Amino acid sequence: MILGVLGFFVLLSLFPFRTFVKCLSAGVPVGPIDLIAMNLRKVPTDVIIDTFIRGNKAGLPLYLDRLEAHYLSGGDVEGVVNALISAGRANLDLTFEKAAAIDLAGRDVQDAVRMSVQPRVISTGGVAGMARNGIEVIAKAKITVKANLDTMVGGAGEETILARVSEGIVSAIGSADTHTDVLKRPELITQKIMKSGLDAGTAFQIISFEVADLDVGRNIGAILQNDQAEADRKVAQAKAEGRRALALAQLQENKAIEQEMKARLVEAEMRVPHALAECFRRGKLLVQRKRKTPAVAMTTGAGPT
């Protein structure tokens, strides 16, 4: 009997009486065992029951166990139910499973429903592109997108949309013959963006695209030609310096050869006195004095000529 009394008081402490009364007053079929089981699983009965009542009053086909399972999975039960109510009022095809999946994927399901009803405008920065004549054109655009609930799970975000649109702007400007064609007909960029299907695989759908501003930038073609000419000048200068260095090396080599020849000449001149002395010693060289003018004669024999 004592154990029974203790068990009764334990169950009574786990039984949310006010929540049960709220369920009865709202006409929601929730039994006491369900409420006690939710407390045992440490699920906030007030949050779950209030959300369940709100969904039932809005005519949503909700189940208490699904709400509880979504809460235990770490989802935002109130946000999911509020998004379902908003989607129902806007005649959007959104089920509880899809809304729960979007919520568990880390996206704001209420914001997704809001963007499906009221599209959002995304502004791009200055996107620079170069026409075929080498003139740079800087474009600023506004993109109107709405959420795509079918691809919200696993779809790319706004950054991907901006990157693809920027790529399309650069491609459209680059396909123009002159920059004046882009300035005169900005719809060339708009047609390029809208026909490219840039929203494929993303969580959004591009509704419209408008070019907000166009500015003329630098003459990229002239800058590239100038850079090329400067590079060619440096290459030619480097080649000329190479030829000059080779010429200087050849000059130094010739000077060295000249010094070597001079050294050989001096060596040969040093041998002349020795040769004369040897001739005097052998008697092959005689000196005759005539009118005080010395004359030197070479002989081939022993006597004078």
Image (cartoon, grey):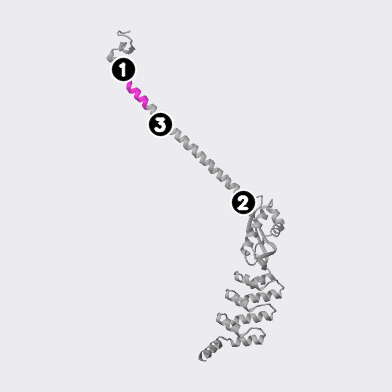
Kindly give the residue lying farthest to the front in the view shown: 1
Residue 128 included in the magenta stretch of the image:
no
Lower position in the chain sequence, tag 3 or tag 1: 3
* Helix, strand or loop for disc 1: helix
Looking at the image, is mark 3 or mark 1 nearer the viewer? 3
Tell me, yes or no, if residue 36 can be seen here. Answer: yes
> Where residue 111 sits: x, y (%)?
64, 72
Per the picture, the main secondary structure of the magenta-coloured stretch is helix
Whether 169 is drawn above or below 111: the answer is above
> Quick check: 8 left or right of 129?
left
Find numbered disc 2 in the image and state the secondary structure of the residue it sits on: helix
- Total numbered labels: 3
Which quadrant is the C terminus positioned in?
A: top left
Q: Are marks 3 and 1 in contact (CB under 8 Å)?
A: no
**Front position among marks 1 and 2:** 2
Q: Magenta residues? A: 263-278
Find residue 5 and name its label: none
Task: Identify the amino acid type marked 1.
Answer: Leu
Estimate the x, y position of residue 18 in percent, counting from the top left: 60, 87
Element class at badge 3 = helix
* Mark positioned earlier in the residue sequence (3 or 2): 2
The picture places residue 250, in percent across and down from the top left corner, at 45, 33
Q: State yes or no: residue 265 in magenta.
A: yes
Mark 2 neighbour density, 10 Å: few (under 14) some (14–19) many (20 or more):
some
Query: Can you identify the residue that label 2 sits on?
Result: 220
Question: Seen in the image, is 261 located left or right of residue 14?
Answer: left
Query: Where does the image place residue 50, in percent across and percent down from the top left?
Result: 63, 82
**Which mark is drawn over residue 256?**
3
Q: Which residue is mark 1?
A: 276
Label whose residue precedes the other's in the sequence (1 or 2): 2
Query: Between marks 3 and 1, how big is the CA–CA gap?
Result: 31 Å
Image point (67%, 75%), residue name: 84
